[in-house]
Amino acid sequence: MKANRYTKIAAAATVFAAVCTLAAWLGRGQTDDTAAQWYSVIPPLLAIVLAFLTRHVLPSLGIAIIAGGLLTHIPRAPLSSAAWVEGFRTSASHLTSTVTDTTYLQILAFIPPIFVMIEILIASGGFRGIIVWLLRWIKGRRSAQGATALMGILCFIDDYTNAIVVGSMMQPITDRFRISREKLAFLVDATSAPIAGLAVISTWIAYEVGLLGQIGGTLELGKSGYAMFFDALSFRFYCLLMIAFVFLHVLLDCDFGPMKTAQEKAFGEGPDDEAAAEKRTPMPAAGNSDRAFKALIPLAGLVLFHLTGLWFDGTTKLKADMQQWQALSQTATAEEMPAQPVDIETLSPASWVYWREVIGHAEHTPLVLACASSFGLTLSLIIAQLFGGLSRPVVVHCFRRGIRRAMIPFVILILAWSLKNCCDTLRTGEFLTTILADQIPAYLFPPILFLVASLTSFATGTSYGTMAILMPTAIPIAHAIDGQTYGLTTMISLGAVLDGSIFGDHCSPISDTTIMSSIASSCDLVQHVRTQLPYSLVVAAVALLGAYVPSSLGLRPVWGLGLGVLAIIATLLILRRRARHR
């Protein structure tokens, strides 16, 4: 055991030293003190290496945050005690800025009510009613996994809601068929951000369209953000192929790598009885029937409240934009007038365009999400009291258990966001973009841009941040490659940035969606990352070599997507055949 531990430490130290050396070598031309420096990669790299090495995420993130604060000041004056003091103060300020950020607090406010609501739904028998109903259609491990993936796609509105609801609801069913928690976490994670990032009606659309519209205006492309989003949609190869992979590998019943080991262990041993008893939620009193509506009504209420809140928020923004534009038109000349905003009054509420525009323009999605979770909790309490007959001690226990479970993602998310603040201060993303952009041949720009976005997102743990970094820096380069026109390279590059950001975020152990997927599925975070990483890498490799490269050479995107699907099928069949011959 000691030999294995020392081997792991040596390997981790070697990887850490090699990456730092490579970063220092690539950044050797950064002589300007105002430029992002090579050591900006150390905090996220340190967090990742320590998390894999120790399997303890909290201390890994904490050490990385301290290192990031120290690196902000110490390299300029390593022998100065004042620099060290300022470094520790900066580390503390990153935590302070996180816990005082309104958006972060609104996201955090979403978590406890959701966890408590889940506990109430379990205790009232609502979840068991859904399970009984689903078990009529689920006959084995394959159909259980397929149902989990399908539910992940149906919860397309928001990746956070997807992770919490699908993970918690499907956990008893996947346990029943001895599907590992690692597999459940993968199915949840693989159908959260990839789906929300593609959906034309989601909480992601406003951010993506906002970035696209901003860069379109800067480059004077004459294209709206939505038009550019749909242009890039054909080149979202990683997200599309990940969805295909999820269903294909379930259909072909082919697991490989650490996931195969986890699946075999779950199938051979089954859930541990003592652990299951320890985690069991108090059951309702005898005589209470397990009815699915006890869970479906609160869940439907949560979704409807969420949609209604987004509708109010989005329509208010659209109407305000129109009124502002009309007022400006009374005084400004035609040359000074901005593009006319969407007139919501001219759209039919029955059309998908209407809802796309409304939800896409919502400005307070975290607040709406927090309010929706509180509404869902309230509704679950009312239903439980009217039809479940839960005693006050059981309800109190559900609150305690739900809040206790919420504390882990609470702390991890705060530390992950604080590490992101460190990366922003050190300009990690800017450094990675700068050094890699100079090495990119023109004819391979979109594929390598996908790699750059993946690396940046993996290192920083944020797809939003990566998109914000690369859109204004990389897309103008693609535009220049196209001869200052809105051509093929620019459109593929848009898809590459969006997809690479999601791929890196999907794999990163410091990503909030990765963390929430593991927590909702009751799976160890490091095990979740370790088991899903080979799957994500396979899909990313297929997307890169089978789709992005051919499309950059002129192949139509539909053919690139088709090649990718065929490559996934061939890979899975080969792996399954090898496994049978062992």
Image (spheres, rainbow, N blue to C red):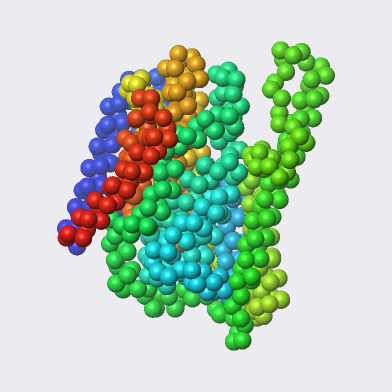
Q: Is residue 233 left or right of residue 245?
A: right
Residue 481 image point, x, y percent? 42, 17
Question: In the rendered view, does 78 fall on the left or right side of 281?
Answer: left
- What is the quadrant of residue 559 in the picture? top left
Q: Residue at x 63, y 52 (%)?
A: 369
Q: Nearer the viewer, residue 74 or 561?
A: 561
In terms of depth relative to the viewer, which is nearer, 234 or 447? 234
- Residue sticking out furthest to the bottom: 286
Q: Could you tell me residue 133's position as x and y percent? A: 54, 72
> Foreground: 343 or 80?
343
Towards the viewer: 429 or 251:
251
Q: Residue at x 38, y 60 (%)?
A: 182
Which residue is located at x 67 percent, y 50 percent? Answer: 307
Q: Quadrant for the N terminus, please.
A: bottom left
Q: Is residue 517 above or below residue 34?
A: below
Q: Can the viewer see residue 72 in this picture?
A: no
Give percent across and percent down for residue 544. 35, 35
